[in-house]
Amino acid sequence: MPDFTLLSDQIILLIQIAAGLFVAAFLSFIYVALTSVMSLIHLKKIAGTDTDNLLVCDVAYFHCRGKRENQEDSVYISPLEDSFSNGVIAACSDGMGGLLYGEVVSRYVVERLGEAYPMKFDDPEGVSEEIRKISSEVYEQYHLGAGATLVMTHIMKNMMNFYSVGDSNIILLRKGRVTLLNHKQNYVSLLIRKLAEGGMDTSEAYRNSRAKALIDFVGNTETNVIHTSKPIQLYEDDIIIVSSDGVTDAVSLNKMKSILSPEFSAQHLARLLKSGVKNKKLPKQDNFSAVVIKMDRSII
């Protein structure tokens, strides 16, 4: 049996401190474990009994200023703690370049989305009307002197609706394939349609000096909100990117396919995409922002 009387007072004090820290750490572990179990039980009650196939959203974002003087991008992510009851909303708004107050308008748009939360997942026309209302508010303030784009996804129980105004991006990566889900409301899209209808070479559209000019935006009159007519089914390892066009100006869809893999977390995917934009080193790099969502298997 060890004789503790041979230990100095300093050593005994250190042993007592170490024992106290061990007890505190053990009690903290028990508390965290119990809290986690109770939270999972609560979430399971919210989500319902059929949770075997329930996916959860792993979410990350980046928000970077390019070569512009001001950061005119704004992003919004709904409270993730409410995801089982109200879904996950992710939005990106890009203030229109060349007009005043782009930063103010994009920030106003996402703030108003936050005020409108929670939104009804099963009522895309109602959500679109809310976006049109926000657009009308911007128009009443600036009378076409300012505007912004908007892309937004709403994910609820493995299903997704999306909404789009302008030329920002909603991108889906699934099993090695990359799909741009929304068509862009810019002049090049209009030209391509007209050239195709006339049986002409559509590449001419991209050489037009007005190619990137927007034909619709938040702040326009009678804004046309593109939205899903029915929800899109999501699967495990799907990756959704909600971004300003500053991202795709630098990183093509094919490049995204090569650098983004479902084996990574949303945080790591966001870091890779952000690095891809920076490494391109475009001399006129626009502001670039994105919300990255990775669909993961639920643990409940």
Image: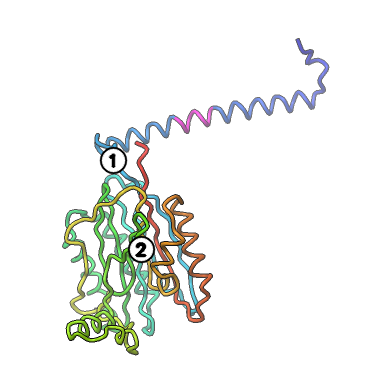
As shown in the figure, which amino acid type bears the numbered disc 2?
Val
Ranked by sequence position, the earlier of labels 1 and 2 is 1
Question: Going 74% across and 26% down the picture, which residue do you hit?
Answer: 13
Question: Going 42% across and 64% down the picture, which residue do you hit?
Answer: 256
Question: 215 above or below 168?
Answer: below
Task: Check residue 242 in the rendering and tell me which mark sits there, or answer none.
Answer: 2
Spot occupied by residue 118 in the image (x, y as percentages of width and height): 26, 54
- Colour setup of the view: rainbow
Query: Could you tell me what secondary structure mostly forms the magenta stretch?
Result: helix
- Distance of mark 1 from mark 2, alpha carbons? 24 Å
248 left or right of 204? Answer: right
Q: Quadrant of residue 249?
A: bottom left
Task: Check residue 241 in the rendering and tell me which mark sits there, or answer none.
Answer: none
Magenta stretch: give its range: 27-33
Spot occupied by residue 251 in the image (x, y as percentages of width and height): 44, 70
Q: Which residue is mark 1?
A: 53
As shown in the figure, which amino acid type bears the numbered disc 1?
Asn
Question: 179 above or below 16?
Answer: below
Question: Going 78% across and 25% down the picture, which residue do you hit?
Answer: 11
Which label lies toward us, 1 or 2?
1
